[in-house]
Amino acid sequence: MTIADLIKKDVNAVTEKKSDLTYLPWAYAWTEALTADENATFSVQMFGDKCYMEVNGTAMVWVTVTLFSKPMTCMLPVMNNKNEPISIAGRTFKDKWGNDKKEVIDSFNVNTAIMRCMTKALALHGLGLYIYSGSDYPPENDLSPVAESLSPQQVKEINVLAKQCGITSN
């Protein structure tokens, strides 16, 4: 399997909808990663003794996924079930029954952010990338004939431009 195969893979049968957002379950995404590359790995960046970075009173996780010997790093805020960043100081609110509840960063929401971030990093490798672009389906066009028609110099120039833009190529 190649990155081009991952880009074209239709994952709609396993996605989940929450509110207006579409999610690819991390377990499916990781299974696909291991199927594509048996040497696939992912790692969570540590910041001292924490697996998240404090950013303006909130937390952000960083995950690197390596597929086909190419590492891709993604970051994601630690969020609540409404996709709002959770304050490190926490906040008190009333639930729907009027009870006081405290929302704080805990192991569950940090773990959820890590696994969502791992899935997002897999999208940087192509798996489910079309979901993040707002498309309902993966690209149908096979671009490999175009890529095969490029000279080595053209490929080198594209790679230099991509690197300058912070994009890594195949």
Image (cartoon, grey):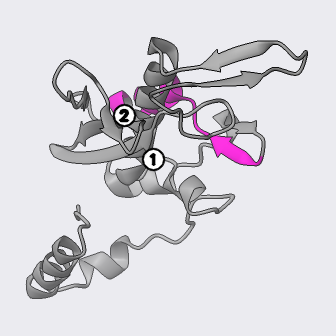
- Give the camera-side residue of 117 and 147: 117
Give the side of residue 8 with respect to residue 33, left or right. right
Q: Is residue 7 above or below residue 71?
A: below
Q: Which mark is residue 33?
A: 2
| Span of residues in magenta | 20-34
Task: Identify whether 98 is placed above or below 44.
Answer: above
The local secondary structure at tag 1 comes to loop
Image spot of residue 56 (x, y percent): 38, 45
| For residue 36, above or below residue 164 | above
Which corner quadrant holds the C terminus? bottom left
Query: Where does residue 143 sit, x and y in percent of width and height?
Result: 41, 73
Report the side of 39 relative to 60 (left or right).
left
The disc label shown at residue 127, or none: 1
The reply to whether the magenta stretch includes residue 135 is no
State the mark number for residue 38.
none
The reply to whether the C-beta atoms of the residues labelled 1 and 2 are less than 8 Å apart is yes
Residue occupying image coordinates x 50% and y 33%: 87
Look at the picture and state if 155 lies above or below 57. below
Q: Nearer the viewer, residue 168 or 101?
A: 101
